Amino acid sequence: MDETLVAKTKRGRKGVWRWVRIPLVALAAIIAIPLVMVPVYSLVPPVSTLMVGRYLTGQPVTRQWRPIDQISDRLKTAVMLSEDGQFCSHNGVDSAALRAEVEAFLAGAPARGASTITMQVARNLFLWNGRSVIRKGLEVPLALYIDFVLPKRRVMEIYLNIAEWGPDGQFGVEAGAQAAFGTTAENFTWRRAALLAVTLPNPHVRRPGQPSAGLMRVAGIVEARALRFSSHASCLFKGAPAL
């Protein structure tokens, strides 16, 4: 074979490898970082990617970590029944809800959401906000891994301490409770617990301290559900919950 042709072939292969290497390195990082950090987070309080983004851009972040046993049992129950009623029984992914979501997507129907609390933890710790099929595809194996490594109580503890709970950089339940009601996260009435829980889908708009009629209605539904199905949240408590 002509030496010039061989040289061109080698340069071509190097060029292809240069372009392939970048996504491969990115993929390896996506896989390696959670594999290492999830076990670390069993002991170390994590921060979310959104919190990191605010730190890097000079925006305020308010967060005081609260151990799960120092968070109102009513609030834990209300959040679970509002966000993920099967949290204690699934393996990080609600297979039935996810299957229905995939079928709806393939049929061109609007997305209804199938994110469990564990999937939200995966997204908050390692991924990005915004609807994306790619992001949802990454959430599933991450959630399965998180559920495999961490106890349910720790998953919920992390979720309650990294969720965005206010429009001005309030992260975690303590900052959310202080901003909404001027109180700590340890003691709540059922109504306040439900109001704080239903703030989570849109903390930039919903105001639990000054709830609209619509927010009160949704909170009432969650409160009734939490009172009726509080036994479903048994994995969150060491002993009998103080409800």
Image (tube, rainbow, N blue to C red):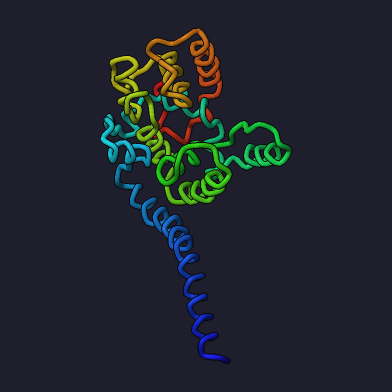
Residue 205 rendering spot, x and y as whole percentages: 44, 19
Residue 73 rendering spot, x and y as whole percentages: 40, 25
Residue 179 rendering spot, x and y as whole percentages: 31, 19
Hey, which quadrant is residue 97 in on the image? top right
In the image, what residue occupies the spot 30% across and 42% down? 45
Is residue 104 placed above or below 10 in the rendered structure?
above
Q: Nearer the viewer, residue 122 or 2?
A: 2
Q: Nearer the viewer, residue 183 or 232?
A: 183
Q: Nearer the viewer, residue 219 or 125?
A: 125
208 relative position to 114: left or right: left
123 relative position to 181: left or right: right
Q: Residue furthest top?
A: 213
- Quarter of the image with the C terminus in it: top left
Is residue 95 placed above or below 77 in the rendered structure?
below
In the image, what residue occupies the spot 41% across and 38% down? 153
Report the label total. 0
- Quarter of the image with the N terminus in it: bottom right
Q: Residue furthest right?
A: 107
Hey, which quadrant is residue 167 in on the image? top left
